[in-house]
């Protein structure tokens, strides 16, 4: 696919490409993700403090993001002991189109939000080099994305990310705090059981 040259919107330096994926492309991406999830099923990570996260996760690529009592980190294997499946071609095409980079990402984290799932404000800072951007793809129900500052607290801004939206956090936006306050259940028919899937691709090493 030809990726749009310009973002439809920029929010605090995050480039947002609304509806960058057609419905057909979203369906194809979901089919590719189904194959990933069959070999690397979703699991519920816990925080360092032992609290179960409301979002279910799995990954594709050389590394998967993981969290338990030992903290946040990247792992080379799914908790079942198998290596993570490769990142689907459909996702890599969006990465190259939106970032313009030749380098492929090491990790594609797949987050599943159902019903009341949310994600608290955090920075993505478990990677070695923050000059590489983070790419996010939203599928399914809309999610209320909140973006803040490099330091914790302060004023924030929010935007509903809808199915097919692509967001790039790079440059000065790379370390901004961000999170998902809530999803809007029933706002998309893409996922048969409802909910929202968000993919985030990152260079880890
Ligand atoms: C994340 O920050 O890992 C996920 C963001 C999102 O779900 O849009
Ligand atoms: Mn994040």
Image (tube, helix red, strand yellow):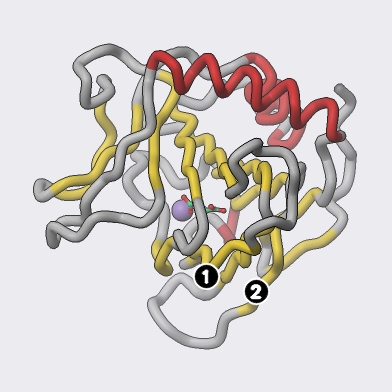
Task: Tell me the number on the disc at residue 181.
Answer: 1
Where residue 21 appears, as percent x and y from the top left, is 81, 36
Task: Mark 2 and ligand 1: say if the CB distance to the nearest ligand atom is below 8 Å.
Answer: no
Task: Tell me the number on the disc at residue 13.
Answer: none
Name the foreground residue: 180 vs 178: 180
Task: Tell me the number on the disc at residue 158.
Answer: 2
Q: Is residue 158 left or right of residue 201?
A: right
Where residue 122 appears, as percent x and y from the top left, is 39, 64
Residue at image position (40%, 51%) is: 55
Name the foreground residue: 189 vs 49: 189
Task: Give the mark nearer the N terminus: 1 vs 2.
Answer: 2
Quarter of the image for residue 142 reads bottom right
Alpha-carbon neighbours of circle 1 within 10 Å: few (<14), some, or many (≥20)?
Answer: some
Residue at image position (83%, 40%) is: 20
* Residue projecting furthest to the front: 193
Name the foreground residue: 97 vs 166: 166
Q: In the image, is residue 174 above or below residue 4? A: below
Alpha-carbon neighbours of circle 2 within 10 Å: few (<14), some, or many (≥20)?
Answer: some
Residue at image position (48%, 13%) is: 86
Where residue 204 appears, as percent x and y from the top left, is 39, 33
* Residue projecting furthest to the left: 70
Q: Is residue 58 left or right of residue 201?
A: left
**Quadrant for the C terminus in the image:** top left
- Residue contact between numbered discs 1 and 2, judged by CB atoms under 8 Å: yes
Helix, strand or loop for disc 2: strand
Q: In the image, is residue 71 above or below residue 103? A: below
Helix, strand or loop for disc 1: strand
């Amino acid at each position: 696919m030809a990726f749009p040259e310009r973002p439809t919107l920029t929010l605090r330096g995050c480039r947002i490409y609304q509806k960058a994926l057609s419905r057909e492309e979203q369906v194809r991406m979901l089919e590719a993700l189904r194959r990933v999830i069959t070999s690397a099923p979703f699991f519920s990570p816990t925080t360092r403090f032992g609290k179960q996260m409301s979002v279910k996760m799995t990954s594709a690529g050389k590394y998967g993001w993981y969290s338990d009592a030992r903290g946040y980190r990247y792992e080379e294997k799914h908790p079942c002991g198998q290596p993570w499946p490769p990142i689907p071609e459909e996702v890599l095409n969006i990465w190259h189109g939106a970032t313009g980079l030749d380098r492929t990402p090491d990790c594609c984290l797949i987050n599943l939000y159902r019903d009341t799932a949310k994600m608290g404000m955090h920075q993505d800072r478990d990677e070695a080099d923050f000059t590489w951007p983070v790419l996010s793809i939203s599928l399914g129900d809309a999610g209320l994305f909140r973006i803040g500052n490099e330091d914790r607290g302060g004023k924030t801004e929010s935007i509903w990310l809808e199915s097919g939206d692509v967001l790039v956090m790079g440059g000065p936006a790379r370390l901004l705090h961000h999170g998902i306050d809530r999803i809007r259940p029933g706002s998309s028919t893409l996922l048969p059981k409802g909910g929202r899937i968000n993919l985030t691709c990152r260079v880890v090493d």
